Amino acid sequence: MTGTRALVRLILRRDRVILPIWVLLLAIMPVTQISAIGGLYSTDAELQSFAASMRATPAFFALYGPLLDWHVAALGVWRAGFVPVILSLASLLTVIRHTRAEEESGRRELLGSTVLGRHAPLTAALIVVASANVIAGLIVAGSLAGTYPVAGALAAGLDYTLVGIAFAVIGVVAAQLTESASGARVIGISALGLAFLLRMAGDTTDASWLSWLSPIAWGQKLRPFADEEWWPLILFAAFIAVTCYAAYALAARRDVAAGLLPPRLGPAQAAPGLAGPFALAWRLHRGLLLAWCAGFAVFGAVIGSAADAASSALRQNAQIMEMLNRLGGGTDPADLFIAALISIFGIAVSGYAIQAALRLRTEESLARAEPLLATAVSRVGWAAGHTLFAVLGPAVVLAVTGLAAGLSYGTASGDIAAHLPATLGAALAQLPAVWIFSGLALALFGLLPRLAAAAWAVLALFLLFGQVGALLELPQVLLDLSPFSHLPTLPGGEVSATPLVAMTAIAAALAIAGLYGFRRRDVG
């Protein structure tokens, strides 16, 4: 373990911006949800009515898990039930970035030539990510313990901490199996998706035993603010210990930069269709794009099929209807339900847009761009291939989401012709705001490449404004910085072309500035 402390300091320095942001942003979600629900419902009767309406909508169980109690703290923690999934995703991606990605880039071998223990990088990554999850759990527990029962606050904090650590160790195992960081991410994200689907199936079908196969469900079975149960901690302890042991055992059986799974060899000669920078970009981006499309098709189908049931529940609650109507939507509760969730999906797709745009920086930092640019490929031509996916990729993902939601909603209501175009249009209306983040990432890549990852920080900041801006009474001019605050609430709302055109123009200007800057700066 020699050198572990130095590597921990290195990781903390490299992630000194993005790590605190995602820890703080995710950890404050429960208290913001509790405050929002407490502001809407001031009596026990209103809280019980709200809980009953939520229990009548299977889609909410699918997204957030089972609703165990009607008290405001239990409702708020339940409403933030998807946050541990996001925390788990951040944890496993961070672990892979500081283990397998370091080996793929060659930096791990360079560090290994010094006085460094074989398992020091793995240990350092686990220490940092586990500590981040512990801090997130402490923030959750501390923000709730002053007002609500300490036992419930502790259970909520442990839920966040242990679920995040569980998927961090899954990410470490994935990093031992393949020799590429992208392959490790596919394995880790697939494991997270499977765990979420198992939890969702166990909570919404008669096969409740399926949820016991998912670490995500174990955290919910701690029952925060609903007669807490502590024995699921044994499941977490056993799983984390066994998975950690497996990760270290696998790491000891392989060479540096190699994976345990043999790489799949391609053909000796590339197909004619793979010639050129655009074909290369398709080869590099297609797996990520297809994965996002598949995942959002599932979520779109879920919200579309639940729209009718949600409509009935919302009609019975005048306060929620009033709150949703203030957002600028129409009067149809089903449209308001779909509009609220599609706006969340738009923020999530912005993450894909940033990821696709920053593939340029990844290729450059791994020294794969320079050999290509030494050929007849121009800088703009090479960058344009990746830019195409940063622009059209989000459009495809949102279109798939809108189509899946529209088809399922139209099938459930018996009117596909009316609901499919409206839902598809609502999804595509998110594009101008999403393109802002594509343009921002491209601009940072071309003009300030060392700060390219700051695009994630900007997205997190705008998400933070949307979640707690009104609660903290931030100035409206500050909240208006987020492009999502200028989008129409569709379906059902009024559409103004001016903000959409303006955001598209800003995104285009940022992208052009980034390409221009890349033409003039050094590569590397």
Image (tube, rainbow, N blue to C red):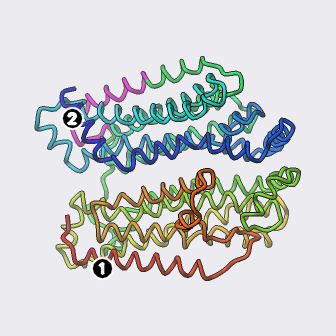
Cα distance between the residues tagged 1 and 2: 38 Å
Task: Give the number of the disc on residue 6.
Answer: 2
At x 27%, y 60%, the residue is 450
Q: Give the left or right position of residue 32, taking residue 460 as reference.
A: right
Is residue 52 on the magenta stretch?
no
- Position in image of residue 238 (x %, y %): 48, 20
Task: Give the number of the disc on residue 516.
Answer: 1
- Position in image of residue 150 (x %, y %): 62, 23
Is residue 249 on the magenta stretch?
yes
Count of numbered circles in the view: 2
Q: Secondary structure at mark 2?
A: helix
The answer to which quarter of the image holds residue 388 is bottom left
Characterize the local packing of mark 2: few (<14), some (14-19) or many (20 or more) Cα atoms within 10 angstroms: some
Q: Main secondary structure of the magenta part?
A: helix
Q: Amino acid at mark 1?
A: Tyr
Q: Which residues are magenta?
A: 241-260
Q: Pick the quarter of the image with the N terminus.
A: top left
- Position in image of residue 124 (x %, y %): 29, 33
The residue closer to the viewer here, 454 or 211, is 454
Characterize the local packing of mark 1: few (<14), some (14-19) or many (20 or more) Cα atoms within 10 angstroms: some
At x 60%, y 82%, the residue is 498
Q: Pick the quarter of the image with the C terminus.
A: bottom left
At x 41%, y 63%, the residue is 356
The residue closer to the viewer here, 203 or 125, is 125
Task: Give the number of the disc on residue 129.
Answer: none
On screen, residue 92 above or below 500: above
Q: Give the left or right position of residue 54, taking residue 45 as reference.
A: left
Q: Amino acid at mark 2?
A: Ala
Q: Give the left or right position of residue 93, taking residue 263 as reference.
A: right
The answer to which quarter of the image holds residue 516 is bottom left
Q: Secondary structure at mark 1?
A: helix
